[in-house]
Image (cartoon, rainbow, N blue to C red):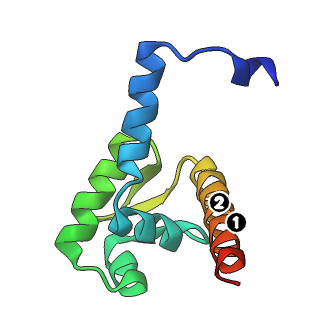
Amino acid sequence: MPRSLSKDFSPVQLQGIAEMFASLSDGSRLTILNSLRTSPAFVSEICLRTGLKQANVSKQLGILRRAGLVQSRRQGNQIKYSIREPMVFDLCGIVCRKLRRDARQRVVMLH
């Protein structure tokens, strides 16, 4: 096992991990992250891309920004948001692969 994976996590590290996963535990936040995957956007554009309400998008972007997952940049009187930490898509990919494995195992069990 690689050294970085074989050591125990400290309580501080575990708290940080828990906070990161908590910020990814909401479907609206994941939808927003996915909408920013290809290009930065203003809140109004995110609303159009996702179908989410402006108040919800603004609230969720605040959570994502505090978690360090998105960044914001003022352009005139608007703020444009972009992905700050692309590793979130690696995490999503890992979860999707696990869900596909689980689904295949359920299908095998049914036959």
User: Viewer-proximal residue, 76 or 20?
Assistant: 20
Query: What residue sits 63% from the left and 74% below the top?
Result: 106
| Quarter-of-image position of residue 111 | bottom right
- Tell me if label 2 and label 1 are in contact, CB under 8 Å: yes
Gap between marks 2 and 1 measured at Cα: 5 Å
Q: Is residue 66 placed above or below 55 in the rendered structure?
A: above
The residue singled out by tag 1 in the image is 101
Q: Position of residue 79 (x, y in %)?
A: 34, 61
Q: Quadrant of residue 20?
A: top left
Residue 44, percent from left and from top: 32, 78
Q: Which residue is mark 2?
A: 98
From what the image shows, is residue 56 above or below residue 11?
Answer: below
Q: Residue at x 61, y 51 (%)?
A: 91
Give 14 or 72, whichever is nearer the viewer: 14
71 up-or-down from 49: above or below: above
Residue at x-position 17% and y-position 70%: 55
Residue 22: give x, y in percent of width and height. Answer: 35, 45
- Quarter of the image for residue 50 reads bottom left
Q: Secondary structure at mark 1?
A: helix
Q: Is residue 82 left or right of residue 29?
A: right
